[in-house]
Amino acid sequence: DSGVTQTPKHLITATGQRVTLRCSPRSGDLSVYWYQQSLDQGLQFLIQYYNGEERAKGNILERFSAQQFPDLHSELNLSSLELGDSALYFCASSMVQGGYYGYTFGSGTRLTVV
Amino acid sequence: AQTVTQSQPEMSVQEAETVTLSCTYDTSESDYYLFWYKQPPSRQMILVIRQEAYKQQNATENRFSVNFQKAAKSFSLKISDSQLGDAAMYFCAYRSATPGNQFYFGTGTSLTVIP
């Protein structure tokens, strides 16, 4: 157990639907990052939050949104889902915004859009 | 934006042998950090080793070591005495030393360990 908790582990939904992925960071970590890993691809950065504030945005679609709550857990909302949104979505957390520390990753949520 | 390139989509190694995974990156920054992550079939991303760009000495973690060539922007991972449990996807990653910056990942190298 890495200390970063992602729920659910698996999610199957239909096109056009909306889902919410949840992430609880490791205790003491203030930064949360969301990544998308499609089949045969590397990890694409979506968005970062630090202590409740959005700090960086990557290749996140307008249909996607996220937030970090006062208890530091984060949610990634995916709407108007398309088949191409099927992927593994990772949440990662770190102690500080930058620097030497690596990420601690959750085990991911496998999203399948049918 | 920074880019990370892993030119070997797949590699294989005999058990107990040594294998080197390649990684190059492109950046105009002078201060940054480099990482190797391992993703076994369980999908969990596991930090293998990290290197600070300002340190000339190559990082080592047990059977894992890196060859960091800053001028060439190269960061290869050497796995010695390969074990079956080393079979996984390996990702090279770059992180700026500027606070707030995210990681940039390569596309990964799938390592097979042959018994």
Image (tube, coloured by chain):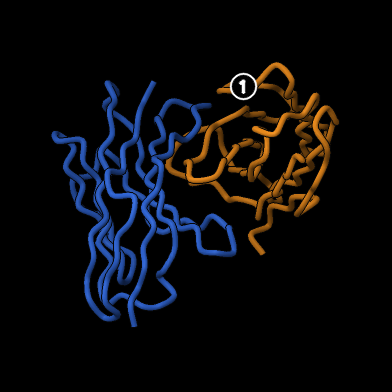
x%, y% of residue B40? 51, 63
Q: Which chain's colour is orange? A: A
Q: Is residue A98 above or below residue B37?
A: above
Residue A20 figure quarter: top right
x%, y% of residue A25? 71, 46
From the image, tell me which residue sits under label 1: A55
x%, y% of residue B27? 29, 25
Residue B9 left/right relative to A9 = left
Residue at left offset 71%, top offset 48%: A109
Residue with the most extreme front position: A114
In the figure, the shade used to draw chain B is blue
Residue B13 figure quarter: bottom left
A6 or B108, which lies in front? B108
Quadrant holding the N terminus of chain A:
bottom right
Helix, strand or loop at label 1? It is strand
Residue A88 left/right relative to A18 = left
x%, y% of residue B37? 44, 53
Number of other residues with Cα within 10 Å of mark 1, as a class: few under 14, some 14 to 19, many 20 or more: some
Q: Chain of mark 1?
A: A
Count the labels in the image: 1
Residue at left offset 75%, top offset 27%: A66
B74 or B21, which lies in front? B21
Query: What residue type is disc 1 on?
Result: Arg
Q: Is residue B8 above or below residue B25?
A: below
Whether residue A90 is visible to the viewer of this picture, yes or no, is no
Q: Is residue B84 above or below residue A85?
A: below
